[in-house]
Amino acid sequence: MLKSLFTRGAMLAVCAVSLLSPALADDAIKIGSFLSATGPASFLGDPELKTLQLYIDKLNAEGGLLGKKVELIHYDDAGDAEKARTFVKRLLDNDKVSLIIGGTTTGTTMAAIPLVERAKIPFISLAGGIDIIDPVKKWVFKTPQTDRMAAAKIMEDMKKRGYTKIALLSETSGFGRSGREQTLKVAPEYGIDIVLDETYGPKDTDMTAQLTKIKNTEGVQAVFVFGFGQGPAIVTKNYAQLGITLPLYQSHGVASNSYIDLAGDAAQGVLISASALLITDDLPADDVQKTVLVNYKKDYETAFKAPVSTFGAYAYDGLMLAVNAIKKAGSTDPSKVRDAIEQTEGYVGATGVVNMSPKDHMGLDLTAFRILEIKDGGWVLIQ
Amino acid sequence: MGAGRPLLVITAGCSGIMFAEFLQYLFSGMTIGATYALVGLGFAIIYNASHVINFAQGEFVMIGGMATVFLIHIGLPLPVAILGAVALAVVTGLALEKLAVEPARNADVVTLIIITIGASIFLRGLAQVLWGKEFFALPAFSGNDPIHLGGATLLPQSLWVLGITLAIVVALAWFFKYTLIGKAILATACNADAAKMMGINTQFILFISFGLSALLGAVAGIIVAPITLTSYDVGIMLGLKGFVAAVLGGLGSAVGAIVGGLLLGIIEAMAAGYISSDYKDAVPFVIILLILFFLPSGLFGARGTERV
Amino acid sequence: MLAKLTHPRIGGLLILSLIIALLPLALPNNYYYDVAIKIGINAIVVVGLNLLIGYAGQISLGHGGFFGLGAYTSGILTAVYGWPPLLALLTGVAVVGVLSFIVARPILRLTGHYLAMATLGLGIIISIVISNEDWLTGGPDGMYVEPFTLLGWELYGEKPWYWVIGALLVISVWMAMNIVDSPAGRALRAVHGSEVAAQVVGVDTTGYKVLLFVVSAVFASVMGSLFAHYSGFITPAQAGFFHSIELVTMVVLGGMASTYGALVGAVLLTVLPQLLSGFEDFEMVIFGLILMLTLIFMPKGLVPTLTHKLKDWRGGRS
Amino acid sequence: MSLLRVENLGKSFGGVDAINDLSFTIAANTIHAVIGPNGAGKTTLFNMITGVYQPTRGDIFLDDASTVGKPPHVLASRGMSRTFQNLQVCMNMTAIENVMVGRHLHLNRSFLAAMLRLPAIVRGDRQCREKAAELMEFVGVGQYIKTDANAMPYGALKRLEIARALAAEPKLLLLDEPAAGLNAKETAEIDGLIQKIAATGITVVLVEHDMKLVMHISDYLLVLDFGKKLAEGTPTEIRNNPEVIAAYLGAA
């Protein structure tokens, strides 16, 4: 037994050496990535990783970039910021990548920022938190809309419908916490008063207690839920169970078909702020994003036989921004690539139209969000 | 008189809402608490047979829910899928005992804890590879139209959860009281050495208890999946809560585990409703610390003096 | 003289110092230094925890909480209130020391799984508080921490940290082994062997358990503080349940009641995720399997089992 | 003056009296035996004397000072030490370390000093180790000095417990069934050992079933039956006590 354990150990050691040593193909362009492909944020990280792999393979099949192969070096941080920090160090110091795309969550992204800033390597984050790009950090960019934008878009819609008193139910995950903070900040700008501020845990399986409280609070006109994963789906079901008839808003954290599948009939009439990807087929032909979205959706769904999600689209935009910038810079020189990303203008992406500037490292405006309503198990564009 | 009436109506309405609110918290708490109770019972059964805490208990819950979803997905009708899932969980439980716990029977308590933690990581990883990382919903057994009761609402599925939990408790009580194996398990729990001398195969008892608690876990996982959804990693939290329930009740006490589970669920719901939804997860732990400080062996745990 | 060298305290420390001194020759870049530093930080916590779990036989599933509390005390006091790092670290020690002392008596009256539950609960409460009070702690997304400075000298970058942590590791191992091989240490091991026997020869077993609980909590707090300054970024996960479990796993995997076992456990569990990262989705399956198999076949942990085998093998030859 | 005085002692477990209204005294420099059938409350009595259990009623005095309410380690520091019916050897330690634990009260117990391994600790430990080795020789397990406790035979472990108890340098030594599980030859050796211990001026109290041993070495006997005192006196008196013969010896 002991002997076999030793052989196993030896094999592992051999594996280790081959895994740890920098890849041999030195002439390839190395793009590093760390995503939460497993763990609580895996349903964000998983499509992100798949998208990166899909399009890098495509790129290579078409002859690569600047005449070189592109190599994706990816590590799974499982949503753990400390793991992410070590993997970023590994990407920077050991794998010597030219650019990093990754950070599924704001927490993992924040852990990476000091390292990329010090290493002076461009970094495109796929996480939502506004703190990532506000204040602007020289080497850090991001592709998803911020949580502040999500809050603003929803508040805008509420204001339009004349709601002034709402209840907020947010998740105690990083996503929900930051979303709550931004909502509390943005609401007064739209003259909206948050009369009840409740939370639920990311692993909670029952939110009827919080919803009962909301139901019994006088004067609430609408409810805004800020969370991702299964939580919002359970909230939606509990909402229907309690027979609450107030309008229910959800954030872009639920922007995938699986939310409708999970919540079932209870999702009828739910309003969300989301990217146009969810309504690709219904988009008017003259919508600027139409072609991009149709192609991405087709590519992804053919390759993985699974419905496309807006999270994968963040990775698509991240990769395209990087590719365009490397092409424009004509090299992988980090500072040239960084400048090129910062100069991105009019890039039509899967999330929105991106116009970066030294003051804006995301480059999206509120048009990147649409208000959708769930009707009969599908998404309908409201505005 | 005319001025008094509306006031009366308001107060009555107010207390009516308060009562309905309380009832709602109670329903939610009991539904989720029943799940904790079943998982806690699984902990108690294995603990009784071997003084092992099986930290992979939550994974049985996951296997129950996920396997049912998967079997329905490949086209089996719900009842068959449920049976299949329970069978899979039981086989996993038995294999876990045979392959992982039995070879290390004489190891330290902490070592066994870590072995079962290793097993739970392994099972979770396997589920993730086999069944994916998404969340799934099981269809409710009998629709989603809420039942209204005293101003509060209850899903038909909650009745299933409470009913099945009750049925299991009754069945277990019968099993322990009237079947040979049941009695043997009790005897082993009471005094393993004496049981061994009486000709009871304690090794076999441990084997059976793993199967039994896997069954309980799987059933819990299936009956709550329509309400709470399921995914490859639901076992972590449910396992932890089940352990809390088992300790709250006094480890090794079946009644304790049931009461502990229900209590835990109700405390959580009440804490979320009346205290703070931010701290509702901390409340059960504060309570359990206080209980352990004053009743070092839980609510129903055996109290006695160690013989030296 | 030779006999002295083969004594585990002296010979072992010599070898450990030698490894720490020579290791940089084999570390090609900062990433490797980073892993080495994390090994060191984990090892020091685990050496302390091993005194409690391995030697005194008291389970704790809550030491992640003390680590996190140390990290956040340092983080908050330096970043938000501008305190000097050393003072913040000592405040962390005081906070953790007092907290662990207050809870130790009621907690350590418990035995076995009840003790496990109570420490687990304590750790979880700490992590929930850290995660919820985001006005102070940055919430679940974590917070940035200033680098460690002492009298105007800034400790920054992997290489200096490597030497600091390396030196602390040698000192910690030396101190831990001193404790084990002393009247106090024998008393503790006797508590594990037979508590009542220890009591009737005059060992204040509760007193020692409390003391050890506090000492191991303080080990964790100090390393939490240093980790916060080294990494520059902390999240509530540092105080979380999984971190606590990870620490206990290091103790058990390496071998309980073996200070070098604690070191080996820290090395393995820190390096393993780095090795397995290439397996992507299979990482968890393989990790779980390694954990199970190791402990099923070596229930006493790696170091005690292997030294035993080595002894047998030597004995068989002579 | 008596070394140990027990007054109206009682102990109930869940309403059942294990010991009831028990009074007796033990004089210094004697060998005192407690006998009685199984379940008579002998071990319970020992546990109360050494502070492992707290009595429900009554009082115990060591050197005329009450011991009730004091934890075992405090009583140990007042000169009491004991062995156990069910072995309580620390199997996670070596044999000699077990004995060294016995000297706990006579050593520098400071944690800080131990952590820094101050010279005083090193010196104290060296002397302690020598003393422990002497004691192991004294009780007749000298050949196990370098052995792990879990590698020793049963008979040797019983003696090791005695050595550990002696290491504390007690005035009063309580031995709970020192000869249980031993063969005739080993029992005879224990007989000699107890007398040797008594000869050094230590007061010995023992619980024992082996009547031959008890009658041979004891100066004085206390007979318990169902938690009550049935008789006490010298071996000769006990041997001729009709009540004892009826209830105990006759029945056996």
Image (cartoon, rainbow, N blue to C red):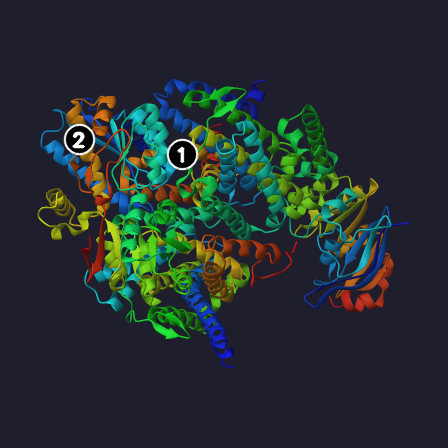
* Classed neighbour count for the residue bearing mark 2: other residues with Cα under 10 Å, few (<14), some (14–19), many (≥20): many
- Give the amino acid type for the residue marked by disc 2 in the picture: Val
Q: Which mark is residue A323?
A: 2
Q: Is residue A231 visible from the viewing direction of this image?
A: no
> Which one is closest to the eye, mark 1 or mark 2?
2
Q: Nearer the viewer, residue D93 or C187?
A: C187
Q: Nearer the viewer, residue A254 or D118?
A: A254
- Residue B216, image x, y percentages: 39, 63
Q: Is residue C198 visible from the viewing direction of this image?
A: yes
- Give the amino acid type for the residue marked by disc 1 in the picture: Thr
- The number of discs equals 2
- Chain letter of mark 1 equals C
Q: Determine whether the residue tagged by mark 1 lies in a helix, strand or loop.
A: helix
- Which quarter of the figure has residue C207? top right
Vertically, is A154 above or below C177?
Answer: below
* Classed neighbour count for the residue bearing mark 1: other residues with Cα under 10 Å, few (<14), some (14–19), many (≥20): many
Left or right of C49? Residue D62 is right
Q: Determine whether the residue tagged by mark 2 lies in a helix, strand or loop.
A: helix
User: Which residue is drawn at the image coordinates 50% and 78% (left, top)?
Assistant: B3
Q: Nearer the viewer, residue B35 or A351?
A: A351
Badges 1 and 2, same chain: no
Left or right of A57? Residue D55 is right
- Chain letter of mark 2 equals A
Mark 1 vs mark 2, CA separation in Å = 35 Å
User: Which residue is drawn at the image coordinates 32% and 61% (left, top)?
Assistant: B225
Q: Which mark is residue C270?
A: 1
Name the residue furthest bottom: B1
Quadrant the C terminus of chain D occupies: bottom right
